Amino acid sequence: MTEKTLFIELFQPFAQYRNPFTFYYAQTYPLPPKSTIIGMLQNALDDWYGLEHGLETWWNLKVSVHGGFESIFWNYQQLIKATKTGISLVRFRGKPTLWNQNLPLYGFPITSQRSPVLQQELFNGWIYIFLKGEDSLLNEIEDALERPKKVLSLGRSEDVVFIRRVKFIRGTKKTAREVAINYPTYVATSVEILRKKEYPTYAIPVRVIFKNEETPVRHKAEIKANTFRDVEFKSVIYAGAWTFLKFKEKVGLEEYSIEGKTFKVVADERASGWL
């Protein structure tokens, strides 16, 4: 049997998990990345900057996310985009002039500009989240989600979620060379161990810390004009529904059965669904 794991089931009517590596349109990740999930949990506990539990405790949480959405659609919106100071956007009386709000973003000399952009959005999603970490933090997360004090969102502030179920569960450890994926998920793995290599690959944020120079921000009042986001990305493959992950060798696997639903989490040094 595996150690205690906290299971969270969510329903989300709309979502947009912005992929920062897309520019001409705003692509969404197919599932929320780890950093987005941690942000929702910090919000639920009113511990945005880890002042109470500590940043390392938060970011050391192991997260495995599964699920999917009914459809994808496109929304035409105005978004704030970054541009470097000194780049000519228009010419006024022969002089290069920045045609934007000239507002600073996270680092000099980046400024902002509002532009109409096509935004990819997700509709009608069921998200299943598995968490491992310090028991005290998991217990507090369970209490906060069972009796939320506020409306919670996952991704954008308008992307509200409805908590369907929160409970502690235990899984069964196995090994397998082929893993049938019933519910889409992320797996961090190298292509060398995969037999099939056609899975979509994403670089997702797994750790985000706001910093003033090298000092982490511990309170909203500490955010300044030169505060920046220190982001760590991890390469993952996206395994869609009813696909098989085929490995060259057997890998560790954790299997969870919850009221007729079976979730499989790859748990191996060479490949892992725990982010």
Image: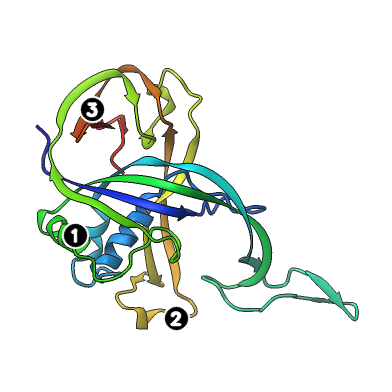
In this picture, residue 122 sits left or right of residue 223 = right
Q: Quadrant of residue 227?
A: bottom left
What residue is rendered at 12% in x and 57% in y? 139
Nearest-to-viewer mark from 2 and 3 = 3
Q: Earlier in the sequence, mark 1 or mark 2?
A: 1
In this picture, residue 71 sits left or right of residue 247 = right
Q: Quadrant of residue 146?
A: bottom left
From the viewer's side, name the closer residue of 237 and 87.
237
What residue is rendered at 35% in x and 79% in y? 220
Residue kind at label 1, given as amino acid type: Glu
Residue at the far right: name it: 93
Q: Which residue is labeled 2 in the image?
A: 224
Mark 3 crowdedness (10 Å alpha carbons): few <14, some 14-19, many ≥20: many
Residue at the far bottom: name it: 221
Mark 1 crowdedness (10 Å alpha carbons): few <14, some 14-19, many ≥20: some
For the residues marked 2 and 3, what is the alpha-carbon distance in whole angstroms?
Answer: 45 Å
Q: Position of residue 100 (x, y in %)?
A: 70, 75
What residue is rendered at 66% in x and 79% in y? 101
From the viewer's side, name the closer residue of 109 and 197.
197
Q: Earlier in the sequence, mark 2 or mark 3?
A: 2
What residue is rendered at 65% in x and 79% in y? 102
Q: Position of residue 9 (x, y in %)?
A: 27, 48
For the residues marked 1 and 3, what is the alpha-carbon distance in whole angstroms?
Answer: 29 Å
Residue kind at label 3, given as amino acid type: Leu
Describe the element under mark 2 as helix, strand or loop: loop
The numbered disc on residue 253 is 3
Location of the C terminus (image quadrant): top left
Could you tell me if the residues under marks 1 and 3 are in contact, i.e. CB atoms within 8 Å?
A: no
The numbered disc on residue 82 is none
The numbered disc on residue 146 is 1
